[in-house]
Image (cartoon, rainbow, N blue to C red):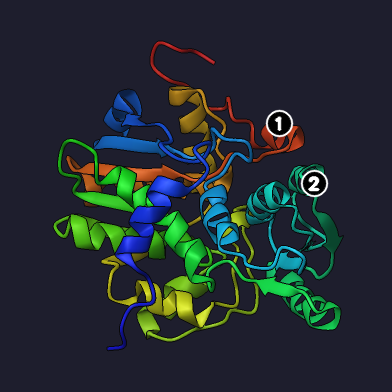
């Protein structure tokens, strides 16, 4: 087995040095929601920051290490990583071009531009946008930044694991949304070393199962499509390094369908009063999908983003669930 790419020392440093607006996000026992799901539930809310997602952590840690600020950066993003990189690059005066698909969330496009990025839309999905971004970077002499491949980005995301392992009681299982693998890789690296008794479970959308298949096959497995409302984890071409990062650290990876994820989003709004985008809600979706598996356990999950347009909030009907004592 090859030596791990990720450094515990650097994850610890990230947890100290990342811009404080992204650190120490709220984590608390969601009593009523947990009771309804049959678990003792701890949620970590990563949407209460300037970009409404966890992606600012890794982007900030990466940008802190950029030597030549005159060389433009290029990335591809479904929207949240692009916002994080734009926020960090703006602080250091680094030019940034973000490629997004033609079907990307318009709110995320608007926010990336507002944070100073040049946004170009190309390709029908995230992975097609990545191909366009790579080509543009090569032609323009810019640095291509790939979320999930850059070590510093994954280590920055690992700072969430540092905070979760500070929870005063042992956590039985941490459930982590899985897209390109940076969040799961960083969190799993830290948790496996500091709370080895805690199980680590990743969650992919059933319509975008490439990382789940890759983990089981122990090699990257592409899919023809990534068809899910959870755009933040809609990956069809896995990053080999990210597959390696999680391979021997994760206990299981599960798939959840979009209907169950919508149910999770509605329950989060009803019980906690927070808007969580589909990719951020899949941990709760996993609890809904297989209640017997988690019954009675102390479970933590990361609500990793909350970027929804007003139209999406309307379409998803987030108030469409009844909660005892809180009629619709």
Mark 2, residues whose alpha carbon is within 10 Å: few (<14), some, or many (≥20)? few
SS for dot 1: helix
Identify the secondary structure beneath mark 2.
helix
- Is residue 231 visible in the rendered image? The answer is yes
The answer to which quarter of the image holds residue 125 is bottom right
Residue 42 position within the rendered picture, expressed as x and y whole percent measured from the top left: 30, 36
How many numbered tags mark residues here? 2
x, y (%) of residue 40?
A: 23, 35
Classify residue 72 as left or right of residue 242: right
Q: Which mark is residue 169?
A: none
Q: Residue at x 46, y 56 (%)?
A: 156
The nearer-to-camera label among 2 and 1 is 2
Q: Quadrant of residue 295?
A: top left
Decide: is 19 above or below 139: above
Instruction: Work out whether residue 213 or residue 239 is closer to the camera in this orientation and state it.
Output: 239
* Label 1 crowd (10 A; few <14 / some 14-19 / many >=20): few
Q: Which quadrant is the C terminus positioned in?
A: top right
Sooner in the amino-acid sequence: mark 2 or mark 1: 2
Residue 254, placed above or below residue 110: below
User: Residue drawn 30% across and 66% down?
Assistant: 252
> What numbered label is drawn on residue 106?
2
Q: Are marks 2 and 1 in contact (CB under 8 Å)?
A: no
The quarter of the picture where the N terminus appears is bottom left
Q: Which mark is residue 314?
A: 1
Which of the two residues, 307 or 6, is positioned nearer the viewer here?
6
Q: Position of residue 33 (x, y in %)?
A: 35, 29
Judge from the rendering whether residue 160 lies leftward or rightward of residue 305; answer left or right. Answer: left
């Amino acid at each position: 087995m090859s030596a791990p790419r990720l450094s515990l020392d650097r994850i610890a440093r990230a947890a100290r040095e990342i811009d404080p607006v992204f650190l120490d996000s709220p984590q608390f026992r969601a009593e009523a929601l947990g009771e309804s799901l049959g678990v003792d539930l701890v949620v970590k809310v990563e949407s209460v920051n300037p970009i409404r997602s966890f992606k600012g952590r890794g982007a900030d840690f990466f940008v802190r290490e950029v030597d030549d600020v005159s060389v433009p950066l290029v990335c591809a993003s479904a929207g949240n990583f692009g916002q994080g990189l734009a926020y960090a690059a703006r602080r250091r005066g680094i030019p940034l071009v973000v490629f997004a698909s033609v079907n990307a969330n318009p709110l995320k496009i608007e926010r990336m531009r507002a944070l100073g990025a040049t946004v170009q839309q190309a390709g029908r999905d995230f992975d097609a946008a990545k191909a366009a971004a790579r080509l543009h970077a090569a032609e323009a002499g810019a640095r291509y930044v790939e979320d999930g491949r850059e070590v510093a980005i994954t280590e920055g995301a690992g700072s969430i694991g540092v905070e979760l392992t500070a929870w005063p009681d042992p956590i039985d299982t941490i459930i982590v949304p899985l897209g390109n693998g940076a969040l799961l890789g960083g969190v799993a690296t830290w948790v496996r070393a500091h709370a080895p008794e805690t199980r680590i479970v990743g969650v992919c959308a059933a319509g975008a199962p490439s990382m789940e298949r890759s983990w089981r096959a122990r090699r990257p497995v592409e899919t023809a499509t990534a068809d899910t409302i959870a755009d933040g984890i809609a990956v069809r071409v896995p990053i080999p390094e990210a597959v390696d990062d999680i391979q021997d650290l994760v206990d299981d990876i599960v798939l959840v369908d979009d209907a169950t994820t919508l149910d999770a989003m509605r329950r989060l709004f009803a019980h906690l009063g927070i808007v969580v985008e589909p990719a951020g809600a899949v941990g709760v979706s996993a609890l809904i999908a297989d209640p017997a598996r988690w019954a009675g356990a102390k479970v933590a999950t990361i609500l990793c983003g909350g970027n929804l347009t007003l139209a999406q909030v309307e379409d998803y009907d987030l108030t469409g669930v009844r909660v005892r004592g809180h009629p619709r």
